[in-house]
Image: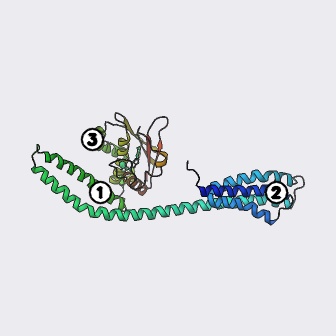
Amino acid sequence: MQLPSKKDIFKIILIGLLFIVIALSHHFFKGHEHIFFLFFFYLPMILSGFWFGLKGSIVACIIMLFLYMPHLISNISWNNFSQKDLDEILEVLMSITIAVLLGILIDREREYNRQLLEQQRLAAIGKTVSEIAHDMKTPLMSIGGFVTQVARKIPEDDPAKKKLDIVIEEVSRLEKMVRNMLEFSKSININKSEVNINRLIEVINESIQEIANRSKVRIILNLSPELSNIMADEEKLKRALLNVITNAIQASPTDDSVVISTEKRKGNVVIKIKDHGPGIRDDQKELIFKTFFTTKEEGTGLGLAISKKIIEAHGGKISFYPNNGEPGTTFVIELPIK
Ligand SMILES: Nc1ncnc2c1ncn2[C@@H]1O[C@H](COP(=O)(O)OP(=O)(O)O)[C@@H](O)[C@H]1O
Ligand SMILES: [Mg+2]
């Protein structure tokens, strides 16, 4: 949980003081509830909503009700209910409504601003990335091509051969990175056709065997026979799933397993990818879908960002949760059937 900042503590103290003033004023000036008290009555609730959103206004409403209830009960003559009594109750209801509405508006405004900033951030990153990747692509391809030609001419037992092989390997890693960067920065076009997700997962499973074997990780498929075909871009979806499954393999301890399962849920096909790795730390939960966030020495931090972009372009959702009662994470991909 995030601790409140110094500024927030000051605001909470100020709101608390205002509540105390209200409580005291009702205590000392019984029967003098005119406009001045009304102002004090509204102020902490409005400030709570304004500073802390809906959560703040709800807490303030509860405190206010708690403080005001004794006064309300003792002041209102329930047997002889008058216009003044009704006004007093309505006043309380009105202040609660205003505080809650303000809280909702403030939350909505903040969410809107956050999304706007995120879009601007992504657009700026996308532009920079595509420019860099574009400039890097051609020289990298020439380096890769020339080094491979030179390496072919060098005898296997030459010590330089080993070094050249490392160069080839590293260049191909850089090329992959550049491809990812270009892919991320492009706006994606989805070309939909009918896709059998179970079949796609079987194909991915075959293509990923080498990586899995290298990490000594077993892939277990648990595919529902009741799955409907969906309308999707098969190639893009393959990329998205590959990224998530590769992460699961990379996170897995050796001799462990990654379970890929499918199921039909309402109008969606749900794909779950479960590993028994170290899990995702609380402070990294917000970051893993962000571009360039990686905890791996050789990571690009683009895999999940690309997967999310592809899945959302299909009207789907990607999320994750820690496994229940055992270590590891399960990623959940939901895709609409139509
Ligand atoms: N299954 C997982 N278990 C634990 N951490 C994960 C898992 N999947 C992703 N992550 C975390 O999310 C980060 C970002 O993943 P990704 O975008 O694929 O980039 P990369 O794989 O290049 O690091 C990873 O570096 C890792 O810290
Ligand atoms: Mg990855």
Q: How crowded is mark 2: few (under 14 residues within 10 Å), some or many (20 or more)?
A: some
Q: As displayed, is residue 100 above or below residue 277?
A: below
Three-letter residue code for mark 2: His
- The residue to which callout 3 is attached is 210
Residue 7: percent from left, percent from top:
60, 58
Residue 14: percent from left, percent from top:
68, 58
Residue 250: percent from left, percent from top:
35, 42
Three-letter residue code for mark 3: Glu
Q: Distance between the residues labelled 2 and 1?
A: 69 Å
- The secondary structure type at the circle numbered 3 is helix
| The one of 310 and 74 positioned closer to us in this rendering | 74
Query: Does mark 2 have its CB less than 8 Å from ligand 1?
Result: no
Q: Which of marks 2 and 1 is nearer the N terminus?
A: 2
- Report the side of 215 relative to 60 (left or right): left
Q: As displayed, is residue 205 above or below residue 184?
A: above
Q: How far apart are marks 2 and 3 (CA)?
A: 75 Å
